[in-house]
Amino acid sequence: MDLAIRSIVHPTDFSDLSSLAFGHALRIALAARSKLHLLHVEPHDTGGALAFPHVRRWLVQWGLAQEADAPSEVAHKLGIEVDTTVVKWQEPTQGILSFLHDIACDLVVLATHGRDGLDHWLRGSVSEIVARHSAIPTLFIAAGARGFVNPLSGQLRMRRALVPVDLSPAPDKAIETVVLLSRLLTGADITLHLLHVGRSVPRIRSSSMIAGPLPAVILRHGNVAQSIVDAAIEFEVDFIGMTTAGHRNPLDALRGSTTERVIRHAPCPVLAIPAV
């Protein structure tokens, strides 16, 4: 079984952080030979030129294309198609969600600055709100996090992944998605670290996607989100894969779900995988 990623959406605000997220979106699109949608939502018409990432410049820098290559030649050789869309006169969150509603999309790649406390309660996070309502697997690249794609060379660092596990939502989908993503990008299996924060280890169903038994689940106690972040640092993982069920109680609406709280402090990208 393969992971089918036929269409990727990367909303961008043209910041340096968005540039790092774009590198991940482009690298995954190359591996999956998929279509890459670059989206910018502008609440106002500034009248200025928009500086979408220069795809060919990145490909030349990565040694995958030549400056003289025609766009059609690059698309045919690398198997990807890139388009750019500008949506004006809309609030960013609504503009992105409307775009996702209108097209078929298998993965969203988002940069997020992350917020905690009162600022997050009052303003929220565009990235988190989009992921919460889109029901599409979303890769978050947070400010200060170490990505698994080198933006200068395009080289991948994907050796270890952390998957938090619990009874609900079931972690099976996250485990399989992490394994398949690593195979898609590197052609090899990744070392999995399974983590449960609680009193006893939940029973995890074995997967046909993995050769041999699953690794033993690591048991930790304390604050769930902080324990996940601490384990990601301890094991030097390259990304975290989490099944997410959104907000479970009123307090989550104020402080964010476990996944959202992990995203704000994770040392690496976080792949949020909807439970349904």
Image (cartoon, grey):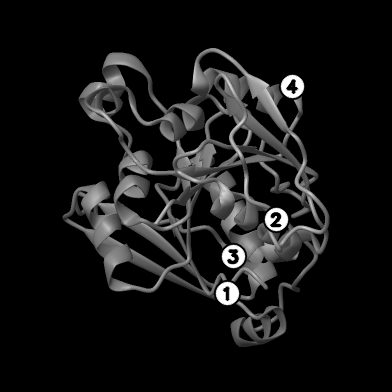
Q: Estimate the x, y position of residue 264 in percent, counting from the top left.
A: 47, 27
Which residue in the structure is indicated by mark 4? 234
Please state which of residues 47 and 197 is positioned toward the viewer in this rendering: 197
User: In which quadrant of the rendered view does residue 188 lie?
Assistant: bottom right
Q: Which mark is residue 12?
A: none
Q: Amino acid at mark 4?
A: Glu
Q: Is residue 174 above or below residue 263?
A: below
Which residue is at 77% across, 51% downward?
Answer: 156
Which residue in the structure is indicated by mark 2? 179
Q: Amino acid at mark 1?
A: Ser
* Element type where label 2 sits in the image: helix
Q: Which mark is residue 34?
A: 1
Which residue is at 39% across, 73% downward?
Answer: 104
Q: CA distance from mark 4 to mark 1?
A: 34 Å
Mark nearer the viewer, 4 or 3: 4
User: In which quadrant of the rendered view does residue 145 lie?
Assistant: top right
Mark 2 closeness class: few <14, some 14–19, many ≥20 residues within 10 Å: many
Q: Earlier in the sequence, mark 4 or mark 3?
A: 3
Q: CA distance from mark 2 to mark 1?
A: 19 Å
Quadrant housing the C terminus = bottom left
**272 sits to left or right of 126:** right
Q: CA distance from mark 4 to mark 3?
A: 35 Å
Q: Estimate the x, y position of residue 16 in percent, counting from the top left.
A: 53, 40
Mark nearer the viewer, 2 or 1: 2
**Do labels 2 and 4 touch, CB within 8 Å?**
no
Q: Estimate the x, y position of residue 74 in percent, counting from the top left.
A: 67, 80
**Do labels 2 and 1 touch, CB within 8 Å?**
no
Q: Amino acid at mark 2?
A: Val
Q: Earlier in the sequence, mark 2 or mark 1?
A: 1
